Image (spheres, grey):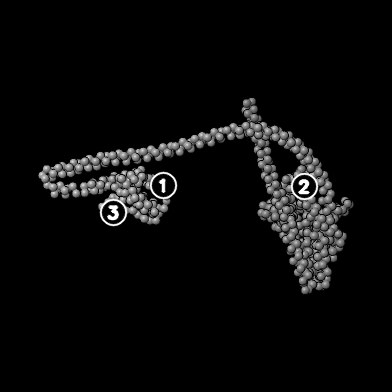
């Protein structure tokens, strides 16, 4: 039993540790995902702020077109229409111009005696006065509005009254007055909720604001989140609703989610070219609280510049109060960065000195290595030269060996044939001698003279040439084709019918065999030296190259 209890306790302790670890892992992964999402949004926001000049230029072009149309209008009704468009274009961009064109609408509506346009102009003028923090005058304009007109434009009227009392509650120093303003704010919120369709993002935002004012933060947050699930991107793409969600997450203690929605609201505001807003300065304040001083300072100064541009005096005080705190924190961060920079420079200086010492040692070593390399390169060049010479000698030896093999082959062939020719010639001479001897013994002087006058030598020479030609072409079967290929002008040397080689071919066949002297060639062929010279000049005239070069080329055939 004790063992069982111990086992259960041990298992329970292990399960608790496992669950705790699992919770920590899930929390860490969620935090990492939120941080990654926030970083992505801040990068997008920075990019949008960088594009502000371009966005402003596009808005200014639109304003310029309507101002030109206003100046060119031929009647007051057209001027009213363009004035009201300019009022809309300047709203949350330039508050003084917003009021100017609202006031222009009022003047034109009176001149037109158009009751409907006059009521519209009164609401526009009230909004313009509120943006200039002229709250009493704005309240007076709202009181001048006809109740019949309010019944058909109640949403705008109630929203303006809510905005008026919200601004008064923010600037009031009297607690009793502040409570009264907040009561009226709540009443107008209830009125807006009663008339707006409940399935719009504006209505959902308004209802969640009512819940927030009652302290029902969790219910308001759940209400907005549920709407966001049913209407994807409706909340995410609405700057006002994103700001409300950010406020609720902040009240619930989820600072990361609050900053994420503030970043998205700021992106939407800046993309629309607004200069009067709350999201960006609130984002800067919360990033300051999270320790991100760089972004906090950047966003607060951006918001301050936009507010000064728009002349939104009611927001200027809020941002200006917070700016000295962020500025001081940034200066502290700069001091810290400066100290860290000095430390870094000191470490860097020591590192550079060490590196220079190391470079000196390495340079000495490299110098020694370079000298060794130089010696090795010289030796390598010598070896390369020896190898080249050896290669040349090897090639020369190979050539000589080929020539020797060829010469040996020629000698073997010609010696064998020479013995055969000599043997035949001796036999013929012996038969010729015997024939003459017989004729002499018979005393037949006439036949003897006839035999002696017959050209036996010419026949033997002809047979010798035929034997030479046959042996040569057996050794060099392609000689005629290769020899004719040396002719540059297309001339071709061919043997006559019944012959194997022509006299020209036979002369250069002897050259191919290494007999280049014309006297020896003449002796062998039975021609005069002049005849051999003439043949050789005739052939070279078709080649067009020097004698020595031509001889070398023939000997390589």
* Quarter of the view holding residue 82: bottom right
Q: Examine the rendering and report whether any part of residue 31 can be seen.
A: yes
Relative to 73, is 15 above or below?
above
Please give the residue where the numbered disc 3 appears in the rendered image.
496
What is the number of the mark on residue 548?
A: 1
Please give the residue where the numbered disc 2 appears in the rendered image.
296
Q: CA distance from mark 3 to mark 1?
A: 28 Å
Nearer to us of marks 1 and 2 is: 1
Q: Give 491 or 388, whichever is nearer the viewer.
A: 491
Q: Examine the rendering and report whether any part of residue 505 can be seen.
A: no
Q: Give 323 or 111, whichever is nearer the viewer.
A: 323
Nearer to us of marks 3 and 1 is: 1
Badge 1 marks a residue whose secondary structure is: helix
**Number of residues whose C-alpha sits closer than 10 Å to that of mark 3, classed few (under 14), some (14–19) or many (20 or more):** few
Q: Earlier in the sequence, mark 1 or mark 2?
A: 2
- Write the residue at 80% across / 55% down: 307
* Quarter of the view holding residue 91: bottom right
**Number of residues whose C-alpha sits closer than 10 Å to that of mark 1, classed few (under 14), some (14–19) or many (20 or more):** few
């Amino acid at each position: 039993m004790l063992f069982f209890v111990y086992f259960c306790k041990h298992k329970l302790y292990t399960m608790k540790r496992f669950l705790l670890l699992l919770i920590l892992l899930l929390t860490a992964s969620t935090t990492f995902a939120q941080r990654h999402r926030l970083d992505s949004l801040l990068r997008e926001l920075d990019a949008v702020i960088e594009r502000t000049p371009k966005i402003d230029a596009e808005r200014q072009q639109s304003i310029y077109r309507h101002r030109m149309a206003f100046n060119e209008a031929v009647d007051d009704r057209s001027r009213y229409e363009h004035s009201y468009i300019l009022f809309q274009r300047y709203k949350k961009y330039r508050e003084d111009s917003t009021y100017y064109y609202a006031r222009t609408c009022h003047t034109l509506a009176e001149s037109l005696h158009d009751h409907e346009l006059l009521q519209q102009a009164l609401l526009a003028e009230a909004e313009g006065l509120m943006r200039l923090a002229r709250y009493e005058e704005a309240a007076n304009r709202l009181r001048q509005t006809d109740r019949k007109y309010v019944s058909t434009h109640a949403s705008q009227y109630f929203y303006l009254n809510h905005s008026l009392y919200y601004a008064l509650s923010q600037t009031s120093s009297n607690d009793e007055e502040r409570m009264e303003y907040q009561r009226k704010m709540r009443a107008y919120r209830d009125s807006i909720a009663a008339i707006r369709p409940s399935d719009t993002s504006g209505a959902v935002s308004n209802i969640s604001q009512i819940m927030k004012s009652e302290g029902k933060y969790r219910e308001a947050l759940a209400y907005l989140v549920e709407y966001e699930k049913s209407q994807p991107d409706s909340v995410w793409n609405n700057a006002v609703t994103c700001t409300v969600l950010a406020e609720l997450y902040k009240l619930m203690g989820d600072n990361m989610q609050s900053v994420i929605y503030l970043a998205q609201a700021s992106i939407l505001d800046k993309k629309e070219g607004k200069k009067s807003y709350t999201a960006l300065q609130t984002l800067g304040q919360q990033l300051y609280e999270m320790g991100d001083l760089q972004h906090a300072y950047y966003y607060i100064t951006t918001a301050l510049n936009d507010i000064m541009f728009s002349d939104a005096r009611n927001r200027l005080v809020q941002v200006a109060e917070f700016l000295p705190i962020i500025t001081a924190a940034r200066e502290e961060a700069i001091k810290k960065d400066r100290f860290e920079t000095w430390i870094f420079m000191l470490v860097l200086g020591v590192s550079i000195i060490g590196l220079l010492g190391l470079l000196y040692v390495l340079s000495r070593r490299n110098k020694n290595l370079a000298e060794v390399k130089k010696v090795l390169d010289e030796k390598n060049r010598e070896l390369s030269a020896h190898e080249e010479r050896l290669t040349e000698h090897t090639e020369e030896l190979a050539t000589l060996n080929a020539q020797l093999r060829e010469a040996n082959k020629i000698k073997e062939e010609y010696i064998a044939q020479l013995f055969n020719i000599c043997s035949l010639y001796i036999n013929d001479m012996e038969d010729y001698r015997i024939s003459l001897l017989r004729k002499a013994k018979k005393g037949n002087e006439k036949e003897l003279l006839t035999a002696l006058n017959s050209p036996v030598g010419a026949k033997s020479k002809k047979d010798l040439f035929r034997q030479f030609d046959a042996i040569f072409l057996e050794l060099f079967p392609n000689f005629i084709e290769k020899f004719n290929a040396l002719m540059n002008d297309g001339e071709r040397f061919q043997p006559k019918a019944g012959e194997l080689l022509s006299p020209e071919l036979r002369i250069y066949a002897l050259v191919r065999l290494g007999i280049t002297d014309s006297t020896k060639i003449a002796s062998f062929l039975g021609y005069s030296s002049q005849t051999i010279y003439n043949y050789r000049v005739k052939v070279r005239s078709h080649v067009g190259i020097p004698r020595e070069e031509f001889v070398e080329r023939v000997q390589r055939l």
